Amino acid sequence: MTGPLNGMTVIEVSAFIAAPYAGLSLAQMGAEVIRIDPIGGGLDHKRWPVTEDGTSLYWAGLNKGKKSVTLNVRDPKGQELAHALMTASGSGNGIVITNLPAKGWLDYAVLKAKRNDLIMINIVGRRDGTVALDYTVNARTGFPMITGPVDFDRPVNHVMPVWDVLTAMSASNAVLIADNHRKETGEGQFVKIALADTAFAVLSHLGYVAEAQINSTDRPAEGNHVFGTFGCDFSTSDGRRVMVTAFTPRHWHALLEATGTVERFNEIASQNAVDFSKEEERYAKRHLIEAELTPWFAERSLGQISEVLESAGACWGPYQTVRQALKEDPDLSTANPMIEEIHQPGIGACIAAGSPVNFSGIPRSPVEPAPILGCDTASVLSDKLGLSESDINDLKGNGVI
């Protein structure tokens, strides 16, 4: 694959989301990412969603553009081969990403003894090494307690594994930082990133921790209202729903112009001594604003609303299922340069996303499909380790590959 990271080789030993997503991000920037799995596939090889014949769409999505090597790492020879790939000589080699425990055959000290400047990124659940997944970490953040309808007496989980994805972004950044450090100093390093630390860092950065500590308060659930400003969902005449926000004065005025309510809200502002140009006052009067705007949306179809809001420059979006997005949204189509139609082995023709990063001076790399499990084993062992066809056949015969 071509791209700004061409010449970098990353060995990925992973499962589930965070580590594979980090590898995917690097692969789509041009790095050669070689994923090592057990023979027959790892924990996530058949993970849902799957096709009718059981092929994992999930696995295909997270492994686009990578090479797949399968090894029996319970066999000392399999471990030896894995170590040889991880510690291969050369300035672009010696980089490992894993979310498996960094012990046994994946112990950093063992690998460092074979390449002193090795870079290893180890993604863990909690900083003490105990197990945690996105869904259990999320429960600890407080977000489920403020998600969902007002006065609902149970926590509401979101289905997007956001901590996995954010941890993946931190991991791919860590690779680049550690690689730059190695180029400057000759030093490798072991980098540990915990899902829980990612979550609590975000909780702090966005002010939730300070709000609880300094103001001695827990934020309540607001339904689909946006905290601290105006944002709300509305029903349309054809049974759809839209989300409308007015974070800035420009967006607020565009919304009023589109809905023909400028004079009405001037009147409300005068009667209630409210300055709607301030987002905190829009938030304080959010239910009043919602009540005033609800009839306008209820009397119009999604198509009519779209035309008017787009023309006015309002900030809004339609609620849609993924199937509706595929049918209706140009951003989820080949009209978007990020999206291409590919032929995914074992699945067929489908659209797939490349990197969302669009450089002005570097062409986008083409979207490449995910490999069939183990399809690159022989070529990688030959190209990277110099194994002969006879060597490879012996390894197959002995159940090592």
Image (tube, rainbow, N blue to C red):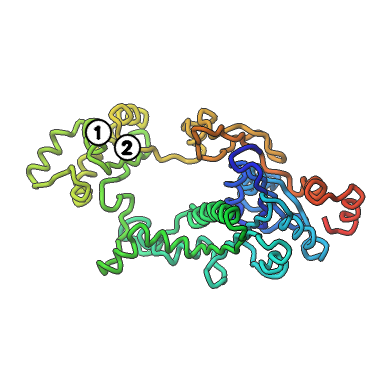
Task: Name the residue nearer the viewer: 85 or 240.
Answer: 85
Q: Quadrant of residue 320?
A: top left
Percent across and percent down for residue 178 are 57, 56
Assign the C terminus to one quadrant of the image.
bottom right
User: In the image, what residue occupies the spot 56% across and 56% down?
Assistant: 181
Kind of residue indicated by mark 2:
Cys
User: In the image, what residue occupies the spot 46% across and 32% down?
Assistant: 329
Relative vertical location of residue 293 with respect to residue 125 in this rendering, above or below: above
Q: Are marks 1 and 2 in contact (CB under 8 Å)?
A: yes
Relative vertical location of residue 256 with respect to residue 194 in this rendering, above or below: above
Relative vertical location of residue 338 with respect to residue 184 in this rendering, above or below: above
The image shows a total of numbered marks equal to: 2
Task: Name the residue nearer the viewer: 78 or 339.
Answer: 78
Q: Tell me the tag on residue 315.
A: 2
Relative vertical location of residue 7 with respect to residue 401 in this rendering, above or below: above
Q: Quadrant of residue 252?
A: top left
User: In the image, what residue occupies the spot 78% across and 49% down?
Assistant: 384
Which residue bears the numbered disc 1?
Answer: 254
- Determine the CA span between mark 1 and mark 2: 8 Å
Q: Is residue 89 left or right of residue 127?
A: right
Assign the N terminus to one quadrant of the image.
top right
User: In the image, what residue occupies the spot 50% across and 36% down?
Assistant: 358
Label 1: which secondary element: helix
